[in-house]
Image: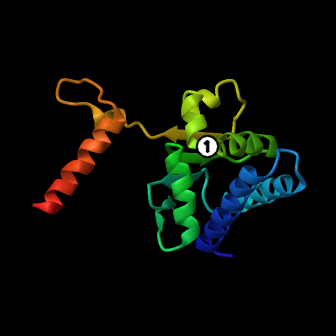
Amino acid sequence: MNKEETLENFLRIFKAALTNSFLYSPNHPYFLTSVENLRKNIEAALQFTHPLVIAVTNTTVQMEGLALHHKVIHEELARILYQRKIKTIKIKEGVNEQELIAFLRRVSLSAKEILKQGGMKALFEGVALAHIEFEEIDYSLFLSDSGGELKDIWSYMLKDALEKKRQRCD
């Protein structure tokens, strides 16, 4: 396989493992098999790029400068990660199945539960992930007004939506 095919395959397997983490317990054979497959695919992808970095937007994921737009799997993966406020994921050589299980189990929590627990960073406090890093989306940069006060995200989003609707009606 070439680089693009290998990265595409990795994303497909990553999405499958993430889906299985939503559906099955951590010790279920389907979940464990998908984690093993994911680790193997990470090793293959690391032959082309090191570390393996997944950039997330609200509509797609990007790896190694390859914008991966037109596939439903990329959109679904982006939606899941973006809802959990994940901006990037970096996977380094040497990642093991225990790290992948810990990561997938936490990412598979509902966005509401993640928020209730204090966010993704709080969920990973004290968890040994030597080979997996992630960066959260920081909305505070977008939500600060000129006085530096942090606005509530929901009121900001509602105000923006109402303004757009008003502009369409005018």
Left or right: residue 146 versus residue 38 is left
Q: Quadrant of residue 48?
A: bottom right
Q: Is residue 33 visible?
A: yes
Q: Residue furthest front?
A: 169
The three-letter code of the residue at mark 1 reads Ser
- Identify which residue is drawn at 80% across, 58% down: 34
- Identify which residue is drawn at 35% across, 38% down: 154
Q: Quadrant of residue 14?
A: bottom right
Is 139 located above or below residue 168 in the figure?
A: above
- Mark 1 lies on residue: 110
Left or right: residue 45 versus residue 169 is right
Q: Nearer the viewer, residue 4 or 164?
A: 164
- Identify which residue is drawn at 70% across, 57% down: 19
- Identify which residue is drawn at 67% across, 69% down: 9
Kind of element beneath mark 1: loop
How far across and how far down the image is residue 120, in percent?
A: 57, 34
How far across and how far down the image is residue 155, in percent?
A: 30, 36
How far across and how far down the image is residue 26, in percent?
A: 82, 44
Q: Quadrant of residue 30?
A: bottom right
Q: Nearer the viewer, residue 93 or 8?
A: 8
Is 63 located above or below residue 108 in the figure?
A: below
Q: Is residue 95 visible?
A: no
Question: In the rendered image, which quarter contains the C terminus?
Answer: bottom left
